Amino acid sequence: GSKWKAYSLFTCLESLNDFPEQIGSLRKRTIEHGTWEEGRRQEVELVNGDPTVIVIGAGHTGLEIAARLKYIGIPHLVVDKNARVGDSWRHRYKALCLHDTVWYNQTPYLQFPSTWPIYSPASKLAGWLEGYASYLELNVWTSSTVTKAEWNDENKTWTVEIDREGKETRVFEVKHLVFATGFRGRPTMPDLPGNSDLKGETVHSAQFTSAENYIGKKAVVVGACNSGHDVAQDFFNHGVDVTMYQRSSTFVVSATAAAELFGAYFKDGFPTDLADIYSSSLPNAVLRRINQRTVPYTAQTTDKSVAILDGLAKVGFKTNLGAYGAGVIPALYERSGGFYMDTGTSQHIINGDIKIKSGGSIERLTETGLKFADGSELEADIVVFATGYGDPRDSMRAIQTRGTQQPSI
C-alpha cells in the first residue's frame, strides 16, 4: 500500500503545560482597590527580585517577546536606549510608511483595529507600540542601555549591568538575554574623497528627516532600494529637483504583487498565529527554490500588467529577480536590503519626475556635487546616502561580554 512521505517536516512548540497563557478564563481575577498603580510600579522597578529574561530592544519583536513572557508568568525586563517606546520609528524620515501590510505586522493579544490603514505611517506605528507596551503592562526601561553582560558558566546565568537614564546602575542575574535589535546594524556611509569640499550637505538616510528644508534646491540620492526610493519620493513631493544614483540593479516588486505574496495567509479573517506557523514552516533552502519559480512568474504577469518593469527599463533603471532569482526573502534575511517594494515611486521614475543615473562609480565629491569615474557630474545641494546598514550583530558586539565560556548570543 501507499506510504506517507514528507519532503519537509516542521515542528513548533505552541504552549508549555506548566506555564499556561493567562488569557480567557485564566486571566487575572484580582479586584484591585487602589493597589494597581503601586503594584505596577513595583513590577516595573523589579522591587521583588531579578527578572528571568532581559530583552534588549523595545521594537516590534522585543515587545512581542515580552508580551508572551508576561502572560505565561515569566518575569521580564525590556531595555531600550531611546527615550520613548516607538522612537526607532519616530526618528526615521517623516515620509516613512511601511511597505508591508497591516496583517503582516499584527501584535499578539492586541490586534490593530479594522480601521487601521493597510500601509501604516511610521509615526502612527510608533504610537501603537507605545500604547501596546502600556496596555499590556510590559516592563520597559527607556533611555537605558546594557553596558556589560558577563556569562557565569557555573550557574548558567548572565550578570547584566544596566545604565538607567544615566542616573543609576542596576545589576541583575538572569537566565536569558535576548537581543531584539532588528535587522539593521550601524549606517554604512561611504568614505569619499572631497567630502569637505562640498558646499552643501551629506547625510545618511538614517539621519535624514524631511525634504521640506530643501525646497528650491537640488538633491542626489545615492542608493535605489526602499529608503532611497522613499527619500527621492519625499524630495519630489516637495518640488525638489532630485536625481537617484543607482549603483547596481535592484529587485523591484509592486505593492500589488507583494500583497499577493504575503496575502496567502496574512489577510483579514485568517488567524495571525496560524499564518506565522505556515510562513515559518518551510526551510529557507526550500523557500528559495519555490520563489525561484514564483518570482519570475510574478514579474511576467502581475508586474508586467502594471508596466512597472518595462517602464523602468526604458528609462535606464536596472532591475533583477533578487538574490538567487528568488525575490525579496533572501535579500531581506541575508542583506536586509537590495530590493524595493513599490509604493508609488517607480511611476515617478518612469515619468521622469525623478531622474536616474545608473551604473559607474563615484570618483569624489566636489564643491558643487558629485563627480563620477566616467567624467560626468551631478550638481547637489544635498546628497543623501541610502547606502544601507552594517552587520546587525554590531549592537551585540558593543556590549562587553566576559567569561571563559560564553553561549552563543
Image: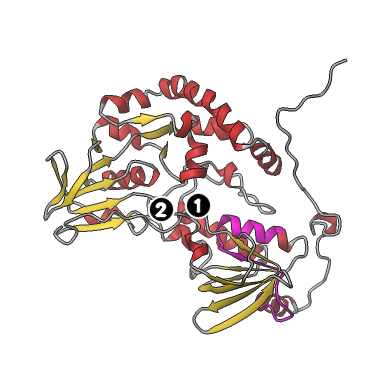
Q: Is residue 323 above or below residue 138?
A: above
Q: 66 or 150: nearer the eye?
A: 150
Q: Which residues are magenta?
A: 44-68
Q: Residue furthest top?
A: 1
Q: Residue furthest front?
A: 404
Residue located 40% across and 33% down the image? 252
Q: Quadrant of the N terminus?
A: top right
x then y, percent, for residue 100: 51, 41
The picture quadrant where one finds residue 226 is: top left
Q: CA distance from mark 2 to mark 1?
A: 9 Å
Marks 2/1 in contact by CB < 8 Å: the verdict is yes
Other residues around mark 2 within 10 Å, as few (<14) / some (14–19) / many (≥20): some
In the image: residue 252, left or right of residue 204? right
Residue 183 badge: 1
| Identity, as a three-letter code, of the amino acid under mark 1 | Phe
Q: Quadrant of the C terminus?
A: bottom right
Residue 116 badge: none
Write down the residue under mark 2: 389
| Identity, as a three-letter code, of the amino acid under mark 2 | Tyr
Residue located 67% across and 52% down the image? 108
In the image: residue 79, left or right of residue 375? right
Residue 394 is a magenta residue: no
Residue located 55% across and 84% down the image? 168
Residue 255 appears in the rendering = no
- Local SS, label 1: loop
x then y, percent, for residue 307: 37, 23
Residue 112 appears in the rendering = yes
x then y, percent, for residue 60: 57, 55
Other residues around mark 1 within 10 Å, as few (<14) / some (14–19) / many (≥20): some
Residue located 42% across and 38% down the image? 339
